[in-house]
Amino acid sequence: MSLQVIGKATIDMDKFRAFRKEERKRAEEQKCWPAALWKDYFYEHQDLCKFAETGYSNFYGGLNYQPDDRFDKKVEATEQYMGPMGLSWDLLFTNEVITVLRFGSLSFGIPTELVECAPYMDLDQYTTADLRHRIGLEKDGMHALVPAGDAGGATRRGLKEDIASVRSDLSQKEADRRPRKPVRDFRIRCFFAITGTVDSPYAASRNRKTGYWVLLTR
């Protein structure tokens, strides 16, 4: 499953630490978060389950998840690094069950209630006129970045659809202009000659003794 960055996120570390503490207790009964939701959610979404499993070790297989202390240390260290610099986690996915985060090479999934998400705004449906209004015409240089005029009613999504349509038309026209390749396969030429199903420059003659067909040029 390939995920793209769709926003920024911050982890409530107090909730995170409390959650991980409870997970260590649940591990004794095989009721850690990935195991508890395996039947109702992660079985059908195993591409997301691998992100949920990042914070656990599972030496015995099955649902024997054990919280991995090394994961906690990595998250804590990353938070300490990001805080003074004002950085945030990359948001890759979020729903009511799991939120997938990334910073550098560390990516994982945790319960959504532990995270505050700030998804990016999808601007594909906005026209350039809308964007000019949002940016504010009084700002210097904005008229060059977001032009007005006839293109003011165009949207990124609409332009992508128009480009895809034009490419499809060009591909079809190219296919129509492409000359058909002559049939070179000997067996096909024989079939055409024997059956007479198409106008063939060849004739077929069968040897009565051997039963073999011979292809002759007309």
Image: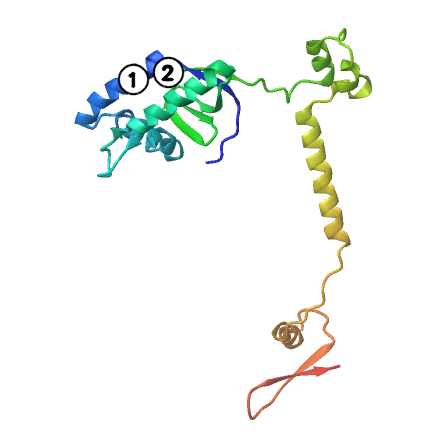
User: Which SS class for mark 1?
Assistant: helix
Mark 1 and mark 2 in contact (Cβ < 8 Å)?
yes
Which residue was labeled with disc 1?
Answer: 19
Which residue occupies the foreground of this view, 65 or 179? Answer: 65
x%, y% of residue 50? 37, 34
Circle 2 residues within 10 Å: few <14, some 14–19, many ≥20: some
Write down the quadrant of residue 95 in the picture. Answer: top left
Residue occupied by mark 2:
114
Q: Earlier in the sequence, mark 2 or mark 1?
A: 1
12 or 94: which is nearer to us? 12
Q: Residue at x 40, y 35 (%)?
A: 47
What kind of residue is marked 1? Phe
Q: Quadrant of residue 212?
A: bottom right
> Residue 200, percent across and down?
72, 73
The image shows residue 191, relative to residue 130, as above or below, that is below
Q: Residue at x 33, y 13 (%)?
A: 15
